Image: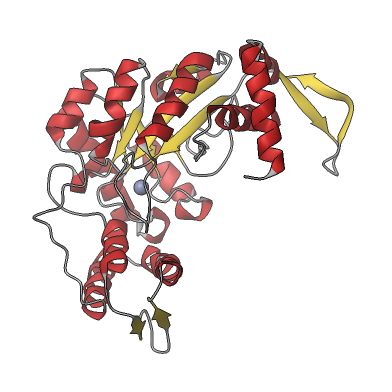
Amino acid sequence: MGWKQRMLIAFFRVLDGLRLIKPVMGFVGRWAPVYSQKGRCVWPYIKRRRNANVHLLAYHRVSDACDSFLPPMSIKMFETQMAYLATYCNVLNLDEAVERIKAQDVPDDAVVVTFDDGYADNYIHAFPILKRLSIPATIFLPTDVIGTGRILWHDQVFSALSNSKVPLIEGFPENGSRFPLRTLQDKRRAQDSISLYFRSLDVPRRCHEIKRLFGLLAFSMNLESSRVYLDWSEVKAMQSHGIGFGSHSVSHPILSFLSETEAREEILESKRLMEKMLGIRVKSFAYPSGRRQDFSETTKALLRESGYECAVSMIHGTNSVGTDLFEMRRTQYQDGNPHMFGARLTYYKCTS
Ligand SMILES: [Zn+2]
């Protein structure tokens, strides 16, 4: 940890001791810095915000499982962050946050907790903490893997690379490509490049290429022992305790690479199945992968046509009146220290 982080933690610890965190958060929520065109803070230095902003937080797996390849957020870190939110923030569910943005009535210190991919540990580890602290959350489900025993394509790729004992693969994805896999760093480098390649493929081609990769890695997926994602009984149990659900497509493709017909199918089918299983209207969608290039204006139009009211991305930032509700911003924090987490939340609230 660098000296700047240590100073920030110390500063927030002092604020906490003086019970000043809430007033400081309230202040930065109502006032924004004034920047020149060159990005320098200039006179009068601060101006009153017209509207408060909503901070959407993104989570995936929450577990103490030992996974050096792609470690999940530890239960302790998650609990620390939730305890901070319960003490100092106004945690809304996503549907309410969207309604408040539309009504230009965003409360101070507004935060929304979201999870992507529907991992079973959301029920096993995160849900008891959310319930105890009365924190609402929204979980985005890729419906193809909920209660079916199937595995999302990116988790198949991670699992194959993580578990393979093969020291090198050559000729994948194309002739001349070469990935050594001797160390964890080698495997992570290979994962970055190979995942990027898989993102660009349509569904049949991706299935074919996953089989080819498994062959090169001498890996086969053990579906018997995998209990990776939520099932519908767990989803319903959480729903009855105020957890909300949105769609994360059917099979987690990169929507901007699909034809309009395929994208419509992913967007509509997941919504239909969730509405049938849960008896609710599904209003929100999370873009798989969620970078700016992973969705398009056509994707947004398809979502609107299909009856969604908002979509969340992984573009960093906060949301307020005027934010495109089909391009909402989210942030992931990896802070286990409550004061560092608080400092970072406050900093981003202040500067966005
Ligand atoms: Zn996802």
Whether 302 is drawn above or below 26: the answer is below
Whether 213 is drawn above or below 133: the answer is below
Q: Is residue 108 left or right of residue 275?
A: right
Q: How many marks?
A: 0
Q: Quadrant of residue 211?
A: bottom left
Q: Is residue 51 visible?
A: no
Which residue occupies 24% across, 77% down?
212
Which residue occupies 38% across, 56% down?
254
Residue 159: percent from left, percent from top: 27, 61
Report the colour scheme: secondary structure
Q: Is residue 17 left or right of residue 243?
A: right
Q: Residue furthest right?
A: 43
Q: Is residue 250 visible?
A: yes
Residue 142: percent from left, percent from top: 26, 44
Which residue occupies 17% across, 24% down?
237
Q: Residue furthest bottom?
A: 176
Residue 314: percent from left, percent from top: 49, 44
Screen quadrant of the N terminus: top right
